[in-house]
Amino acid sequence: MSTELIRVLVVEDDEVSAKAVRVMLERLACSVEIVEDGAEAVERFRHHKYDLVLMGWQMPTMDGFEATARIRTMLHGKQTPIIGTTAGRDRAECMAAGMNDLMPKPFRLENLRLVLLRWTAWPGVQESGRCETGTTCV
């Protein structure tokens, strides 16, 4: 089994939520980088490779829709799973924006675990805990 950490970019402008998701992801053995808006996310993504992006929606400077579109134009951005994080958007909006899935806020450890199982090669739990293909995990 690989001991390499799953690299997660979290795009979250709320400081409390950012701290909470960092603690949870680190508990799940992930390497976490947090940026506050979409423009920072695009710039960070341009220079680093991530296994997963958790993308907020409403942020200063550049929102999650535009950031996702820009990341998708990058060669390594076409395959990286981008998961929308929101308290109020629906799945159709998420997919139309180019995201792979939607995870509701507030962040919860079990939801993060399921997203990691579905969208990464995370070895954190047994195979029996996997989500069904074509369904929403959370």
Image (tube, rainbow, N blue to C red):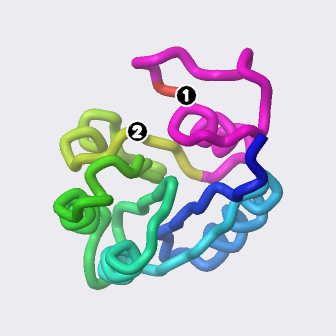
Q: CA distance from mark 2 to mark 1?
A: 9 Å
Identify the residue shown where x is 35% and y is 45%.
89
SS for dot 1: loop
Residue 109 versus residue 31: which sits nearer the camera?
31
Image quarter hosting the C terminus: top right
Q: Is residue 125 left or right of residue 91?
A: right
* As drawn, 34 above or below 71: below
Q: Looking at the image, do the residues carrying marks 2 and 1 touch, with CB atoms under 8 Å apart?
A: yes
Mark 2 burial class by Cα count in 10 Å: few <14, some 14-19, many 20+: many
Q: Is residue 118 left or right of residue 96?
A: right
* As drawn, 34 above or below 121: below
Q: Is residue 36 left or right of residue 99?
A: right
Name of the residue lying farthest toward the right: 27
Identify the residue shown where x is 78% and y is 32%.
125
- Is-magenta flag for residue 122? yes
Part of the protein shown in magenta: 106-135
Q: Which residue is mark 1?
A: 137
Which of disc 1 and disc 2 is earlier in sequence? 2
Identify the residue shown where x is 48% and y is 50%.
87
Amino acid carrying mark 2 in the image: Asp
Image quarter hosting the N terminus: top right
Q: Is residue 37 left or right of residue 118?
A: left
Amino acid carrying mark 1 in the image: Cys
Name of the residue lying farthest toward the front: 1
Residue 116 screen position, x and y as percent: 61, 42
Identify the residue shown where x is 82% and y is 57%.
27
Q: Which residue is mark 2?
A: 101
SS for dot 2: strand
Mark 1 burial class by Cα count in 10 Å: few <14, some 14-19, many 20+: many
Residue 63 screen position, x and y as percent: 28, 70
Residue 110 screen position, x and y as percent: 73, 38
